[in-house]
Structures are given as structure tokens and as C-alpha cells.
Image: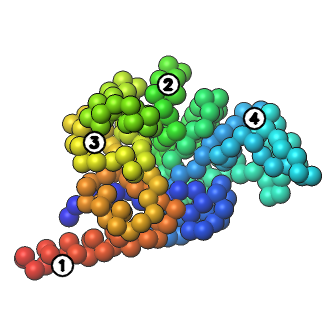
Amino acid sequence: MNVFPLITAHTGCMGHAAHSLESLCAALKVGADVYEDDIRVTRDGVPVLAHDDEIALPGGKRGSLAAMTLEELNEALNPPILELADILNWIRTAGRTMNLDIKTDDALKPTAALVKRMEMTDRVFLSGCGHERADLAERSGIALRKLLNINVDSFRSLSYAEAVQQACQEASRTRCFGLNLPHQAVKPELLEAAKQADLAVYVWTVSETEDMRRFAEWGVDSITTRDPEKLIAVRDEKNGAEERTEWTQS
């Protein structure tokens, strides 16, 4: 039986707000293998779940997450911002894995230190690392597995084969274990090149059932979706079909 791709639940899954405990709990409840969320750090170096630096404050004001301490943020926000440490405790209890989408270079060291302190290096990996950030992680001694976020612009300026070659070379050079890329950029040629380079292929963010089926058939290593329940149904459908085939051939 072919191995089905890891099912990665994108933050904001199953109709819940992004960066929310409800989204995480929904992903765990339906049985996602991996949970993805965006990571930034406060002024006092606390890793938190957030996509953007700009945040809405009371009275219609706007603020900068990076310019505020955790205490200042929680005094201003309701509900309070979620700390990565709290989410990692849920991940550990559930026995799952977390994809930490690093949004700034400044988030690398505090995130790595937190993961090491919680003894969860085997339960997390980094994404959000373009070539420069992946190289910075290497030079900084960040001992966490990481994916290379491909340079999408290279797929516009180079031939497809050249862009794929560049992505594989950059991933290998910065000791990334795989490529992280939008599903629109994936073709069988990329999967073959990644396989030759011993690189995993993680695709995001997939919504349609037919796309899920196609990428599973092509053999990607992970599919990220905001509807993990739909992807689980595709997996169950595929496994059921394979079991029936094996039974009729036995």
C-alpha cells in the first residue's frame, strides 16, 4: 500500500479563526498529522502565534507586535495572544508534530531556544525559510529541521527545469530536509528532481478534492489544507480502494 502524504492542517482550519486554540483543537480532533501556524516574537523575545506584525488595538489604533512586550499585548488584546509554548504543550500531549512558519529572522533563535527547553526538537520543524533565512539558521547553529520555501520568482524568471534545479541546490546547500511550495508550482518533474536530491516535497494550501487526489497520487510528502477533514476523506477513500484491489488479487 502506498504511503499517503502527511495531512497538515493550516492555521484557521475547519472555519475557525487563524492563530486560535479552536483551530488547533479542530485539527487535533479530526486527526491531522501536523499543525501549521505562523510564528513571530514580542519585544521581550516571546514566540507567539501571528502572521502580521501590525495588530489592531482598542480605540481603532494600530500597533506593532515586535514593539510590544507580551504583557503589553495581553493588556491590550482580548482574547490574549497565544504563546507558542502553550500550543507546543497541546502538540506534545496529542503526540503530533508542528510546522512553525517563521515570519522574521528575529524569531529564529527564541523559537529554537524554546523548543530545546521544552525538549521537543523531534516534534517540530521550521518553514517560512527562504534561502537567506535558511542560511542564517545554519550559520546561527539552529538545530531544528527545516524546509526551504522556494523562491517563487525564480519560477517566473527561469525555465521550470532551471528553477527546480536552483531550489534543490539551495535546499541541499542549507541542509533543509525538503521543499515547501505553493501547490500551483508542483509538476512531476519537480518531484523527480527532489527525489534524486533526497528532498521531501511539502505543498500548500490545497482546497479542492481533485487536487488532493492528484498530489497524493504523485507522491508528495505532505499536503497542507484548511480542510483536513476533506483530505482525511481522500486518504480513507484511497486506502479503501487499495485494500479492495489487494483482496481481489489475493
Describe residue 54's horizontal placement relative to residue 210 as left or right: right
Disc number lying in front (1 or 3): 3
Mark 2 and mark 4 lie on one chain; the one further toward the N terminus is 4
* Discs 2, 3 touching: Cβ within 8 Å: no
C-alpha gap between disc 2 and disc 4: 21 Å
162 or 70: nearer the eye? 162
Q: Could you tell me which residue is drawn at 58 percent across and 50 percent down?
A: 37
- Disc number placed over residue 132 in the picture, else none: 2
Residue type marked 1? Arg
Screen quadrant of the C terminus: bottom left
Residue, far top: 139
Mark 2 and mark 3 lie on one chain; the one further toward the N terminus is 2
The residue indicated by pointer 4 is: 66
Mark 1 and mark 3 lie on one chain; the one further toward the N terminus is 3
Report which quarter residue 118 is drawn in: top right
The residue indicated by pointer 1 is: 244
x, y percent for residue 5: 34, 57
Local crowd at mark 1 within 10 Å, few (<14), some, or many (≥20)? few
Mark 4 and mark 3 lie on one chain; the one further toward the N terminus is 4
Mark 1 and mark 4 lie on one chain; the one further toward the N terminus is 4
User: Compared to 12, does 166 lie above or below?
Assistant: above
x, y percent for residue 225: 47, 60
The residue indicated by pointer 3 is: 190
Residue type marked 3? Leu
Residue type marked 2? Glu
